[in-house]
Image (tube, grey):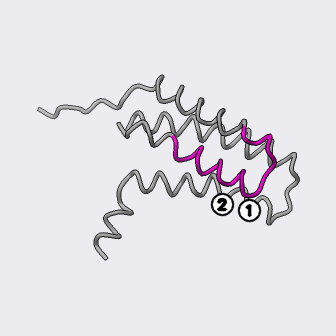
Amino acid sequence: MSKVKQAFGRSEMIYALVCLIVAVLLPLIYHWLHISVVMRMGTLFIGFNSLFALGSGVYLRKTRQPWYLMLVFPILFLGMVYWRYARYNYALVIAYLLMAYVAYGLAKPHEMQNNK
């Protein structure tokens, strides 16, 4: 049990779970609530997911996480698009990856303070 608790306590696992919620669960919730395609595209896919991609790039850089974690969100979203949505959403996968990459590159890593 402690290994499971230790695995879920790691920041990489928490990040992956948040990506899973944003990339898979939120689109399903939009579908279950019968929110229109236009609203889903505008608010969730273009609005919220774009901000999440930018924020994840900044978060990963500031917490000094490995760069390849930027791929988690776009890959999960790619799987969701392949399973459920139209082909034109594939362009968003590339856009999310580029946004995360730019945010990762522009963010400054968090400086460790020396307590003397």
Disc 2/disc 1 C-alpha distance (Å): 6 Å
Question: In the displayed structure, does residue 98 sit left or right of residue 110?
Answer: right
Magenta part, dominant SS: helix
Report the residue at 36% width, 60% height from top: 9
Q: For mark 1, what is the residue? A: 29
Residue 113's disc is none
Question: In the displayed structure, does residue 4 sit left or right of residue 46?
Answer: left
* Amino acid type of the residue that numbered disc 2 sits on in the rendered structure: Leu
Report the residue at 63% width, 52% height from top: 23
The location of residue 32, given as percent across then percent down, is: 79, 66
In the displayed structure, 27 sits above or below 41; it is below
Indicate the quadrant containing the C terminus: top left, top right, bottom left or bottom right: top left
Question: In the displayed structure, does residue 11 sit left or right of residue 115?
Answer: right
Indicate the quadrant containing the N terminus: top left, top right, bottom left or bottom right: bottom left
Would you say the residues marked 2 and 1 are in contact, meaning their CB atoms lie under 8 Å apart? yes
Q: For mark 2, what is the residue? A: 25
Residue at the outermost top position: 106
- Determine if the magenta segment contains residue 88: yes
Instruction: Assess disc 1: are there few (<14), some (14-19) or many (≥20) residues with their C-alpha within 10 Å of its C-alpha.
Output: few
Residue at the outermost left position: 116
* Amino acid type of the residue that numbered disc 1 sits on in the rendered structure: Ile
For label 2, the SS is helix
Question: In the displayed structure, does residue 1 sit left or right of residue 13?
Answer: left
Q: Which residues are magenta?
A: 71-90
The location of residue 4, given as percent across then percent down, is: 35, 70
